[in-house]
Image (tube, rainbow, N blue to C red):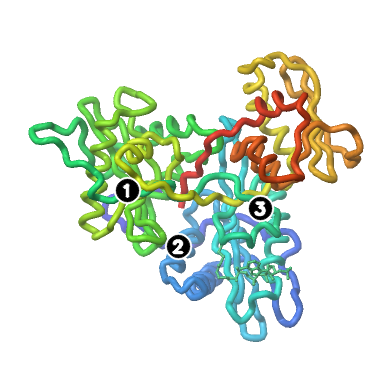
Amino acid sequence: MLAKAGEPIHPRPRILRNEHAASCPQGVPVDLDDGLWLKAVRDAQDVGRLAAFNASVNQDSAVGVLTRWWLGGTHPTVTLPDFLYVEDTKRNEIVSTLGLMIQTWAYEGVPLQVGQVELVGTHPDYRGRGLIRAQMEVIERMLEARGCVLSCIEGIPYFYRQFGYEYAIPLGSCANLSLNQVPAVAEGQKEPVTVRRMKVDTDLQTVMALYDAQAAELCVVPVRNEALWRYQGSAPPGIPEPPETYVVEDDTGVMGYFRVRKNMWEPWLEFMETSVRPGGHVWGSQDALLVVLRFAKGLAKERKYAKLCFALPKSHPLVMVANDLGAESERQYAWQVHIADHADFLRRIAPALERRLAHSLLTGFSGSLGINTMPRLIRLQFEQGRLVSVAQVDDSREQVVLRMPPLLLTQLVLGYRSCQEIIDCHLDARVHPRARQLVDILFPKTESFIYQAI
Ligand SMILES: CC(C)(COP(=O)(O)OP(=O)(O)OC[C@H]1O[C@@H](n2cnc3c(N)ncnc32)[C@H](O)[C@@H]1OP(=O)(O)O)[C@@H](O)C(=O)NCCC(=O)NCCS
């Protein structure tokens, strides 16, 4: 809800809106022995304790501010019991926690419910005792109850593999550019566009349309509705690396926007999302994008940052312009993604699979594809280009044509790696030559990006 004139922008709700809206996850509280109890957040007092714990375990008061904001009752999807904690009842202290933020992503236009695991931490004295493992088990049930086909985390390396997560969607910066690599405007030349801060009241609808236009070019991308946009605009001071949104205007009005923030690790200004489309063109124009870079250079200089960096898809037009200016490529990190049930996932993305077939040499295909996920077999049956069934059988002795262990299948179906790239690196993956064409059509390498909706 927008604040009326004269009202504080972040009024503290007297009653937490979500306090009574959702019930405790099934099976919670859990007795973990030795006075340790796994619980779900219930009320404002719990939120305060959790915020203090998160600030302390992350050694960053900003994480405490973030916790209060997310759980303050105004987030469009977060409810209090989505956040779990373990309490040492002998000391009446929180000693471990994690939470789930439900969101919607689109897979080539097909909406999917996704749970993002967030704010994971255990007090140093309690680490290695299975407290995160116990909470992840509850999260699995919560994901199922909320109809989430995917869950994701941008977490520390390796740790989440043991819970079935695999790197599968690009995350973070792919390139960086020194400020002196951004050229000044040529003498006597007028900039073709201007830049100013976004005003939610007047610019939001246009900016939302610009976001949707850029999202439509990617395979997997978050769906951001107006409630989420407005929520993001309500970020309190003091959260970690707060984003700033700017709009780009030409004679016709607003035709672009971009979001920047300080990079989490380096004193660099990071582009988080950018959609600049003079005349509605997908690729924008080099001149307009150079104005954006010059504007960002000005911001970075004011803040004494050394570089600009680009947390964007590698093929993004702004990244291309930066590359032409000599940007340094970075190894892009990735979201770790868990697909609990690949057969269910394939069923849900059927419209995208059918579209890929329809636009291929195998248009109107009838036949089946067997995927051995070891030990389970998933059989996709197509009739005249329609996916009529996805069956899961436990007997993998049936002849199959694609062998792909579950974590690798996650990479394949999300288009993170091509079948060939996976096979080249993993001897346990294999495709029969007669299925190669079909597999490459159904599961091409594509570009996805999860623009972070704080
Ligand atoms: C990473 C962290 C959350 C793990 O918490 P924890 O309560 O010790 O985790 P658990 O005891 O439930 O660990 C589960 C398993 O992972 C193993 N493990 C623990 N830390 C690990 C790590 N950093 N890397 C790989 N494995 C790890 C444990 O040995 C355990 O294995 P087991 O079940 O086979 O015995 C904790 O070390 C921490 O808070 N670190 C600082 C903050 C942080 O990095 N948070 C994560 C942000 S994404």
Closest to the camera, between mark 1 and mark 2, is 1
Specify the label residue 165 is tagged with: 3
Q: Is residue 380 above or below residue 150?
A: above
Q: CA distance from mark 2 to mark 3?
A: 25 Å
Label 2: few (<14), some (14–19) or many (≥20) C-alpha neighbours in 10 Å: many
Horizontally, residue 383 falls left or right of residue 180, namely right
Task: Inspect the image, locate mark 1, and give the three-letter code of the amino acid beneath it.
Answer: Leu
Q: CA distance from mark 1 to mark 2?
A: 29 Å
Task: Inspect the image, locate mark 2, and give the three-letter code of the amino acid beneath it.
Answer: Leu
**Image quadrant assignment for residue 348:** top right
Closest to the camera, between mark 2 and mark 3, is 3
- The residue at the point 17 percent across, 41 percent down is 184
Q: Which residue is mark 1?
A: 177
- Marks 1 and 2, the one that precedes in the sequence: 2
Position of residue 229 measured from the top left corner of the image (x, y, whole percent): 42, 44
Position of residue 99 measured from the top left corner of the image (x, y, whole percent): 59, 60
- The residue at the point 67 percent across, 22 percent down is 354
Position of residue 402 measured from the top left corner of the image (x, y, whole percent): 77, 34
Q: Which residue is mark 2?
A: 66
Tag 1's secondary structure? strand
* CB within 8 Å, label 1 to label 3: no
